[in-house]
């Protein structure tokens, strides 16, 4: 095979397409850009021959992608909220829809004074790569956050990301199951918990079911078991005017609204925010006791 970008990219597109990869044009360029240490945009400008070492590296990555391994794991990072986060099979790959969690939490924090931000008790439950907590810490240098995860391996990676983003002093990490054993009250509880029902995991994309950590995906037989546990625990640990911000899955709107209206006071504000696909994605509960 001739070692130039045009030929290699066509080979990659054809191989990825024949193996069921969807956005072959973009993914083939992301992998080439990574193998060459350049931006995706620059791959459109390459005319010079590519070294055999780079071509071999690129082809190896394309073969891995064709077998179903997610691109983020192959290149070792994922962009989230305008920042780069290291990822590997220890953690869930951050999704664009989860950025809505950061947006809504940031909006609430922006409404508070700096003095109040400094004393607020904030926890990111099931932090994974740490992308939510770290994004908030970078946006608000005056805040402190707790980041919890049931997986010690996930916490190792989250700590590494916090160090890379120079916010390690703003974060405390705890190996913990949801809010169990954590002492409140919390002013903000934010979380992207597992919410796929156990029976549906085998039907999701191979990239997800074969490579991402099941513990970060499996929300129990109903899909809302972990969500429900967290909502109930948050009710007991939120401050009187605390905020709960949770990502939910498709078709779970009615169940979570019913639970929230059942356990929170009638004065509490409960609402759902939709994502760019028009799906109810983020549950917001303002606790008004």
Image (cartoon, grey):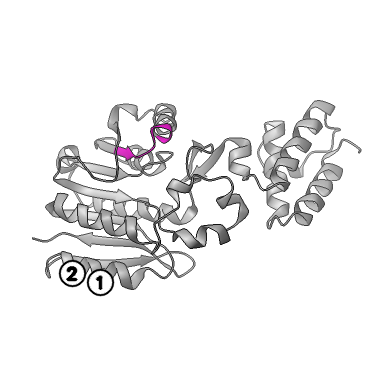
Q: Residues within 10 Å of mark 1 (few under 14, many from 20)?
A: few
- For residue 106, above or below residue 131: below
Residue toward you, 207 or 120: 207
Secondary element under disc 1, as helix, strand or loop, is helix
Relative image position of residue 212 (x, y in whole percent): 53, 45
What's the mark number on residue 258? 1
Can you name the residue that lies furthest to the right here? 2
- For residue 64, above or below residue 152: below
- For residue 156, above or below residue 272: above
- Magenta-highlighted residues: 147-154
* Residue 196 horizontal side relative to residue 118, left or right: right
- Measure the alpha-carbon separation of dots 1 and 2: 6 Å
Q: Quadrant location of the C terminus? A: bottom left
Q: Residue at x 59, y 39 (%)?
A: 73
Q: Quadrant location of the N terminus? A: top right
Q: Residues within 10 Å of mark 2 (few under 14, many from 20)?
A: few
Relative image position of residue 227 (x, y in whole percent): 32, 57
Asked whether 149 falls inside the magenta stretch, the response is yes
Secondary element under disc 2, as helix, strand or loop, is helix
Q: Residue at x 58, y 35 (%)?
A: 76
What's the mark number on residue 247? none
Can you name the residue that lies furthest to the left here? 289
User: Cβ–Cβ below 8 Å for labels 1 and 2?
Assistant: yes
- For residue 234, above or below residue 256: above
Q: Give the total of numbered labels.
A: 2
Asked whether 55 falls inside the magenta stretch, the response is no
Relative image position of residue 287 (x, y in whole percent): 15, 59
Based on the displayed image, in which of its 4 quarters is residue 53 positioned? top right
> According to the image, label 2 marks what residue?
262
Based on the displayed image, in which of its 4 quarters is residue 281 positioned? bottom left
Q: Residue at x 31, y 70 (%)?
A: 255
Relative image position of residue 100 (x, y in whole percent): 39, 56
């Amino acid at each position: 095979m001739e070692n130039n970008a045009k030929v290699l990219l066509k080979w990659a597109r054809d191989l990825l397409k024949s193996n069921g990869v969807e956005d072959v044009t973009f993914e083939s360029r992301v992998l080439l850009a990574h193998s060459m240490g350049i931006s995706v945009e620059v791959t459109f400008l390459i005319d010079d021959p590519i070294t055999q070492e780079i071509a071999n590296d690129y082809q190896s990555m394309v073969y891995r992608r064709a077998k179903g391994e997610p691109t983020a794991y192959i290149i070792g990072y994922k962009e989230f909220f305008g920042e780069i986060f290291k990822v590997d099979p220890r953690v869930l790959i951050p999704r664009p829809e989860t950025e809505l969690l950061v947006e809504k939490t940031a909006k609430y924090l922006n409404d508070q004074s700096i003095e109040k931000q400094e004393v607020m008790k904030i926890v990111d439950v099931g932090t994974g790569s740490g992308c939510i907590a770290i994004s908030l810490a970078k946006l608000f240098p005056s805040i402190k956050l707790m980041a919890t995860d049931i997986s010690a391996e996930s916490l190792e990676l989250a700590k590494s990301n916090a160090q890379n983003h120079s916010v390690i002093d703003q974060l405390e990490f705890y190996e913990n199951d949801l809010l169990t054993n954590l002492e409140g009250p919390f002013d903000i509880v934010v979380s992207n918990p597992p919410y796929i029902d156990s029976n549906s995991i085998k039907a999701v994309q191979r990239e997800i079911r074969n490579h991402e950590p099941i513990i970060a995906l499996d929300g129990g037989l109903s899909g809302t078991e972990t969500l429900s546990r967290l909502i109930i625990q948050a009710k007991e640990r939120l401050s009187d005017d605390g905020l709960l911000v949770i990502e939910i899955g498709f078709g779970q709107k009615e169940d979570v609204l019913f639970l929230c209206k059942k356990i929170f006071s009638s004065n509490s504000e409960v609402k759902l925010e939709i994502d760019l696909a028009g799906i109810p994605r983020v549950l917001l509960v303002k606790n008004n006791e």
